[in-house]
Image: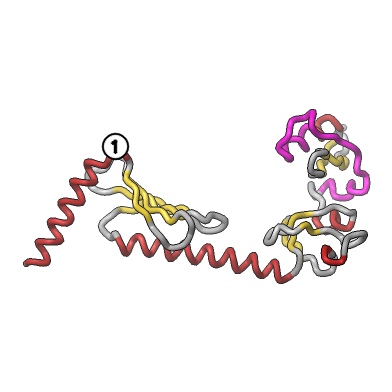
């Protein structure tokens, strides 16, 4: 007979981070919770949380239910501590009727949610602009991979060229449009030869 999973609260003391784990055995729940919190088994405590047993089949407790139970979250946009306003100073209040929850992400309010969406859209737009920029600057190169977009800031375009063994990369390290070009150490001589030939051909075309 399969044992019924129940809710356990796994807590670490130093910063008050905790999670809810569903399991039929407390030691196993403690082990899973420690793993989720990125801690060793001996650094967490595990106690029953029967008020959350109703979410066992779902496998997770909805953030709003946790907030209503007195838990707190960091806003996914501004990182402000989001929790019910009971007992807090007026300037720290976070009325739950203003909190926006999307999946497991929690936002202070709609303004923070909109700010997050804009930041994400801007990051994706910058990534598209980066890809177009490097291809326009160096249409002679064969770009093999692009890395960037939300949530990354740094954008990378990997490329190869005739005679290359390892290739190189173009990078926008800070997402500000400043692109730097890098060649693998083992391909520097091949790159110098390629560039010399490319510039020679370009010069010949101009004088033709």
Is residue 51 found inside the magenta-colored segment of the image? yes
Q: Nearer the viewer, residue 29 or 71?
A: 71
View extreme (left): residue: 208
Please give the name of the residue rendered at 81% of the width and 34% of the height, measured from the top-left corner: 44
**Residue 111: where, in percent of width, then height?**
71, 71
The residue at the point 38 percent across, 58 percent down is 179
Q: Would residue 94 be visible to someone looking at this image?
A: no
Q: Is residue 58 visible?
A: yes
Give the residue displayed 74% in from the left and 59% down from the top. Answer: 80
Residue 164 picture location, percent across and down: 26, 43
166 relative to 34 in the view: left or right: left
Which of the 4 image quadrants contains residue 133?
Answer: bottom left
Left or right of residue 208: residue 86: right
Quadrant including the C terminus: bottom left
Element marked by disc 1? helix
Considering only vertical position in the picture, is 13 above or below 41? Answer: below
Q: Nearer the viewer, residue 166 or 59?
A: 166
The 10 Å Cα crowd at callout 1, few under 14, some 14 to 19, many 20 or more, is few
Q: Which percent across, then down, holds residue 151?
A: 57, 56
Location of mark 1 (residue)? 186
Q: Is residue 64 left or right of residue 147?
A: right
Q: Which residues are magenta?
A: 31-57
Position above or below: 192 against 136: above
Q: Nearer the viewer, residue 16 or 89?
A: 89
> Residue 185: x, y in percent?
31, 39
């Amino acid at each position: 007979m399969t044992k019924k999973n129940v809710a356990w609260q796994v807590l670490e003391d130093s910063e008050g981070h905790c999670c809810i784990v569903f399991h039929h055995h407390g030691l196993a729940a403690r082990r899973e919770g420690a793993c989720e919190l990125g801690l060793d088994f001996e650094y967490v405590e595990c106690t029953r949380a029967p008020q959350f047993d109703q979410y066992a089949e779902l496998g997770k407790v909805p953030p709003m239910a946790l907030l209503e139970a007195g838990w707190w979250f960091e806003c996914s946009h501004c990182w402000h501590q989001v929790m019910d306003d009971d007992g807090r100073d007026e300037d720290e209040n976070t009325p739950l009727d203003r909190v926006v929850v999307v999946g497991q992400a929690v936002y202070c309010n709609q303004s923070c949610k909109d700010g997050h969406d804009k930041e994400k859209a801007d990051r994706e737009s910058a990534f598209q602009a980066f890809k177009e920029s490097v291809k326009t600057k160096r249409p002679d190169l064969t770009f093999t991979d692009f890395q960037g977009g939300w949530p990354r800031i740094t954008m990378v375009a990997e490329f190869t060229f005739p005679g290359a063994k390892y290739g190189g990369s173009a990078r926008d390290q800070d997402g500000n449009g400043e692109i730097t070009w890098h060649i693998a150490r083992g391909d520097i001589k091949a790159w110098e030869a390629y560039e010399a030939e490319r510039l020679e051909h370009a010069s010949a075309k101009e004088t033709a």
